[in-house]
Amino acid sequence: MWLLKIVTVLLVAAAMDMALAHALELPGKLRLPKDQYLAAQAIYYPGFRFGGVAEPLSIAAVTLLAFLTPPVGAGFWLTVSACIALLLTHAVYWIGIYPVNSFWLRDIRLEHAIRAFFAVDSGVGNRFESAEWTYFRDRWEYSHLARAVLAVAAFVLLVTAVTR
């Protein structure tokens, strides 16, 4: 069980790092004009896609840890709470960020697998055509801020659970 706890903490830390990295960029990126902001957006996808794998793995690991933890005492409920925070973090991605990524990446040359993941060719982003670019920027940036808060909460809850 100790190995599962260590691996789970590392996976949650990796998932949290991705969210925190985006949140820490917020003040600087909000000052960029449209052309610089959009240019900066495109450079992140190659690196962040590898880090993004940690998120579903962390959800699976925390879920497994919750199932293996006796359902009595604070340790169990802290683990379940960490799992809920991770699920909410993931939901914010799909609801707040994924549609914006699909729209922004439609004109960027991407590898086939990435284009397929973001459904770039499916017309997902067409409903956004008339919206102001700052709407997308704010939705994307503040969704990442919400993810960072949830990911930090998940990490703190998990570390508290496994160190009790």
Image (cartoon, rainbow, N blue to C red):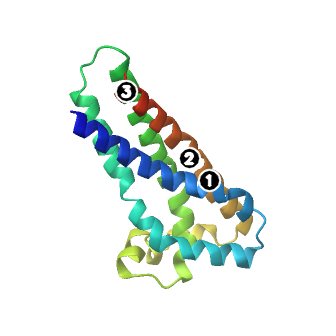
Tag 3: residue type? Thr
Q: Which mark is residue 23?
A: 1
Label 2 crowding class (10 Å Cα cut-off): few <14, some 14-19, many 20+? many
Would you name the residue on which mark 3 appears? 163
Q: Secondary structure at mark 1?
A: helix
Label 3 crowding class (10 Å Cα cut-off): few <14, some 14-19, many 20+? few
Q: Which is more N-terminal, label 2 or label 3?
A: 2
For the residues labelled 2 and 1, say whether their Cβ atoms are less than 8 Å apart. Answer: yes
Residue positioned 69% across, 72% down in the render? 37
Label 1 crowding class (10 Å Cα cut-off): few <14, some 14-19, many 20+? many
Using the image as rendered, state which of residue 162 and residue 132 is in the foreground.
162
Q: CA distance from mark 3 to mark 2?
A: 22 Å
Please provide percent x and percent y for residue 12: 40, 45
Residue positioned 50% across, 43% down in the render? 151
Q: CA distance from mark 3 to mark 1?
A: 27 Å
For the residues labelled 3 and 2, say whether their Cβ atoms are less than 8 Å apart. Answer: no
Residue positioned 66% across, 63% down in the render? 136
Q: Secondary structure at mark 3?
A: loop
Would you name the residue on which mark 2 appears? 148
Q: CA distance from mark 2 to mark 1?
A: 6 Å
